[in-house]
């Protein structure tokens, strides 16, 4: 089957435990045979998992659960390390940072001797692969014997709570003998999955283990000394890299290293006397917990708080503001420059990044190999995509002015396009890499002219087979560091280079103002239009991921019903096991987010207030799913439909709910995701998200020939009935919920025919009526 490979993240959420797991990396692809030199990147597991909830109010005595993958395994697996080392980090993993994998070590077996208290050792090998345990009495007896005959496992402090949006590493499952893409290793940071017993913390009424804050005082002082030498009054440290990426390699996590804040979004601003961190509503609580007293948290959007650039503009009077020009976009730099000039201030660009000068143990730049994405999954070859880019350059020529009889001079004609976005480069060339954890991209720049294309990439990453592939597609290579001298040298002769306004400001500075044109992001538009192979791959990947999610929830419900304690580590591990059993699974696209005990949002049955908030959010979700709109409608315009039901009760959310979905070809696509959030800090939050594709709709009246559009859902997970306050729903909305769950049931049943437990759970959750009884773990969908 010809499928495209993609990946996306799904989060489910309900009263109990929150499990926001990212979809396995190769999302929507059926990777089977490999063409020239590369192993097919398996299809992306779709949406990451929803957060679930563990109810802790039960009369049954709890018991430990540690099912191993092997049904009949009764022996405690030993802890062993493999020699696999990832280039994404130079750090080694520590016991308190134990996770599925670290950047330097991959654990081949689950370390069952890791515990948070001196309790009877857990038996990891007991039970069947479907999660069915022994009777309580027998297990109690077995544990007693273990305690007498075995040594007590070492006591290891529980890991700090997970704070980052970094993703989990995929597991590579490639046919034996065929080269496989490198695994996307997780970075060894404080964002690793949390390990600990949810039940233990809940019963003991313990607080979340306080994560030691990084003392950033010495770092800030070193930066200030360098600022004095450069005569800078403010210094900006963004979260991005030299390609404008949201997710970055460990060596580019400058803001995280400087501040101690591990969230994916935020900007640090340092003055001679103060240090500020600006972040949005997703990270208010996390930033407050992680920042030390050297930093002042600026909650962007809260009570009118401005983002860092507008905040600086208000204060920048007769000052110099420094920033690495590689880490700020052209559009933002231009905005600041224009505003600063009016206030007698200047934006300056030190020769070296000041954080790099202070960060003595900065990880090395990744050197993982680049590999080819087979045509059977891409659906279009690189030669065709390069031709489309060149045609766009040709069409971008300026028109002859009406008052002039002469055509534009050659120096004004566009002759090439410069591509800085990593996902754009990967898409154009059908190449993939693993320089950024959980992202199949590689660090490079691409220059496309009419007669040549030049890829600026570290030559160490490119094997001979990939070099041959590039040559066959008319692409030459230069070293990654040669890009800046190349842009200054004007090797391409007369004519202008097309760049987008989100390009790093270093690019137009190197070209000078008379050598470039700012144009809309045409390549991103090309990339957003999915061919049939890609769409089929996405649909199949989300089906497989939905089936794995149902298996996981069925397992979780059964274990809790039988009195087991489920640790956050065990829950995340089990989810990974179910996904890995799906065809074409290559690994998660995001790190599993699992929370229980004090880390979970809520437990057991929802309160009336929680049910009402959930239902209002669901109503907005339904309104968008059912929307029909003319071509050209923006996400902002549709966002009103999502808010309408919330506004009736005086509820709202801060961030816009529309974003582009991620695909294994690794781009933010125009396939839209719906997401709604009502969040009360310290109380609870609600998200219901689905990955959607936009499709043409046939309407009764085609007004003035307009093209009308609607959504087609890719996410295949049931809506949780127990969370809904049915009296708030209209007849049409109730019908939508019933039809949605019935459709999910019909699609997933064929994939679960051999798992009776999962089938029972699916059919129970998808029953047509709105019933009062509840599922123990609960489900709601959260995509992020």
Image: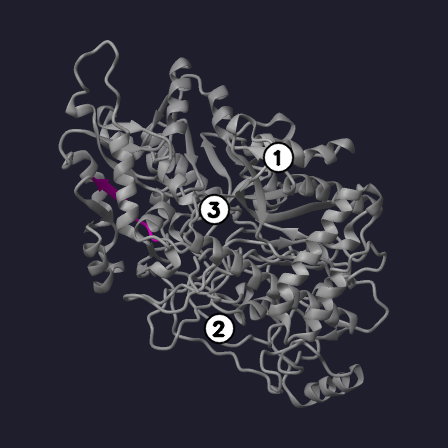
Q: Position of 343 compared to 449: left or right? A: right
Which of pointers 1 and 3 lies earlier in the amino acid sequence?
Answer: 3
Please name the residue that numbered disc 3 is placed on: 256
Between circles 1 and 3, the one closer to the viewer is: 1
Residue 317 visible in the picture: yes
Secondary structure, magenta segment, majority class:
strand
* Badge nearest the viewer, 2 or 1: 1
Q: Which residue is mark 2?
A: 107
Dot 2 falls on a residue whose secondary structure is: loop
User: Is 160 situated above or below 522?
Assistant: below
Using the image, determine if residue 67 lies above or below residue 222.
below
Which residue matches tag 1? 700
Q: Residue at x 18, y 55 (%)?
A: 471
Q: Nearer the viewer, residue 630 or 613?
A: 630
Give the x, y percent position of residue 365: 33, 54
From the top left corner, tell me how far across and down residue 552 is, in percent. 65, 67
Question: Which structural element holds mark 1?
Answer: loop
The CA span between labels 3 and 2 is: 26 Å
Q: Earlier in the sequence, mark 3 or mark 2?
A: 2
The local crowd at label 3, few if under 14, some if 14 to 19, many if 20 or more residues have their Cα within 10 Å, is many
Please state which of residues 761 and 331 is positioned toward the viewer in this rendering.
Answer: 761
Query: What residue range appears in magenta?
Result: 442-449
Q: Is residue 444 magenta?
A: yes
């Amino acid at each position: 089957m010809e499928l495209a490979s993609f990946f996306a993240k799904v989060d489910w959420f309900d009263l109990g435990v929150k499990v926001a797991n990212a979809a396995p990396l190769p999302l929507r692809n059926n990777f089977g045979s490999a063409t020239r030199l590369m192993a097919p990147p398996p299809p992306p597991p779709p949406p990451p998992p929803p957060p679930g909830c563990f109810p802790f109010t039960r009369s049954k005595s709890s018991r430990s659960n540690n099912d191993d993958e092997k049904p009949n395994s009764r022996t405690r697996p030993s802890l062993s390390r493999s020699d696999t080392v990832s280039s994404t980090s130079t750090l080694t993993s520590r016991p308190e940072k134990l996770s599925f994998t670290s950047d330097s070590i991959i654990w081949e077996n689950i370390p069952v001797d890791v515990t948070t208290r001196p309790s009877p050792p857990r038996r990891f090998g007991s039970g069947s692969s479907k999660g069915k345990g022994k009777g309580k009495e027998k297990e109690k007896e077995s544990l007693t014997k273990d305690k007498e005959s075995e040594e007590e496992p070492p006591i290891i402090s529980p890991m700090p709570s997970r704070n980052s949006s970094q993703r989990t590493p995929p597991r590579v499952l490639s046919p034996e003998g065929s080269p496989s893409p490198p695994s996307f290793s997780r970075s060894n940071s404080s964002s690793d999955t949390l390990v600990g017993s949810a039940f233990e913390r809940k019963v003991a009424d313990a607080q979340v283990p306080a994560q030691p804050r990084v003392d950033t005082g010495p770092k800030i002082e070193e930066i200030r000394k360098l600022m004095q030498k450069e005569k800078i009054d403010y210094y900006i440290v963004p979260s991005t890299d030299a390609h404008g990426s949201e997710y970055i390699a460990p060596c580019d996590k400058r803001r995280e290293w400087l501040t101690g804040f591990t969230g994916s979004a935020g900007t640090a601003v340092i003055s001679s006397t103060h240090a500020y961190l600006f972040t949005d509503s997703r990270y208010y609580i996390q930033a407050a917990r992680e920042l030390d007293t050297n930093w002042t948290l600026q909650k962007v959007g809260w009570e009118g708080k401005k983002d860092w650039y507008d905040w600086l503009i208000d204060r920048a009077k007769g000052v110099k503001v420094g920033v690495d020009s590689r880490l700020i976009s052209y559009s933002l730099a231009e905005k600041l420059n224009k505003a600063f000039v009016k206030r007698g201030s200047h934006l300056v660009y030190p020769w070296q990044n000041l954080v790099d000068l202070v960060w003595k143990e900065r990880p090395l730049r990744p050197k993982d190999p680049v590999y080819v994405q087979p045509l059977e999954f891409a659906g279009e070859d690189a030669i065709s995509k390069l031709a489309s880019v060149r045609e766009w350059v040709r069409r971008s020529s300026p028109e002859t002015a009406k008052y002039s009889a002469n055509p534009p001079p050659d120096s004004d004609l566009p002759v090439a396009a410069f591509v800085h976005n990593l996902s754009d480069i990967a898409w154009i060339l059908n190449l993939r890499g693993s320089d950024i954890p959980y992202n199949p991209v590689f660090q490079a720049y691409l220059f496309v002219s009419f007669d040549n294309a030049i890829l600026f990439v570290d030559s160490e990453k490119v094997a001979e087979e990939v070099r041959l592939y590039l040559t066959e597609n008319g692409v030459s290579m230069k070293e990654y560091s040669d890009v800046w001298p190349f842009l200054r040298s004007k090797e391409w002769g007369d004519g202008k280079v097309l760049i987008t306004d989100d390009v790093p400001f270093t690019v137009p500075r190197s070209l000078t103002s008379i050598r470039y044109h700012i144009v809309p992001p045409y390549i991103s538009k090309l990339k957003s239009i999915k061919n049939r192979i890609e769409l089929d791959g996405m649909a199949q990947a989300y089906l497989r991921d939905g089936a794995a999610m149902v298996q996981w929830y069925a397992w979780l419900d059964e274990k809790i019903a039988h009195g087991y304690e489920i640790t956050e580590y065990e829950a995340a591990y089990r989810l990974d096991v179910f996904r890995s059993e799906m065809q074409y699974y290559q690994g998660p696209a995001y790190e599993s987010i699992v929370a229980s005990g004090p880390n979970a949002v809520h437990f057991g049955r929802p309160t009336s207030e929680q049910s009402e908030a959930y239902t209002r959010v669901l109503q907005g979700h339904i309104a968008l799913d059912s929307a029909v709109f003319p071509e050209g409608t923006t996400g902002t315009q549709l966002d009103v439909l999502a808010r309408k039901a919330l506004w009736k009760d005086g509820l709202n959310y801060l961030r816009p709910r529309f974003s582009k979905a991620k695909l294994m070809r690794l781009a933010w696509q125009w396939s839209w995701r719906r997401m709604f959030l009502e969040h009360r800090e310290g109380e609870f939050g609600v998200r219901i998200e689905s990955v959607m594709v936009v499709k043409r709709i046939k309407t009764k009246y085609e007004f003035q020939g307009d093209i009308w559009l609607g959504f087609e859902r890719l996410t295949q997970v049931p809506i949780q009935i127990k969370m809904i306050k049915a009296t708030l729903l209209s007849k049409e909305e109730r019908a939508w919920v019933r039809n949605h769950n019935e459709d999910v049931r019909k699609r997933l049943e064929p994939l679960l025919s051999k798992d009776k437990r999962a089938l029972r759970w699916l059919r129970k959750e998808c029953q047509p009526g709105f019933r009062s009884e509840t599922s123990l773990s609960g489900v709601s969908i959260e995509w992020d």
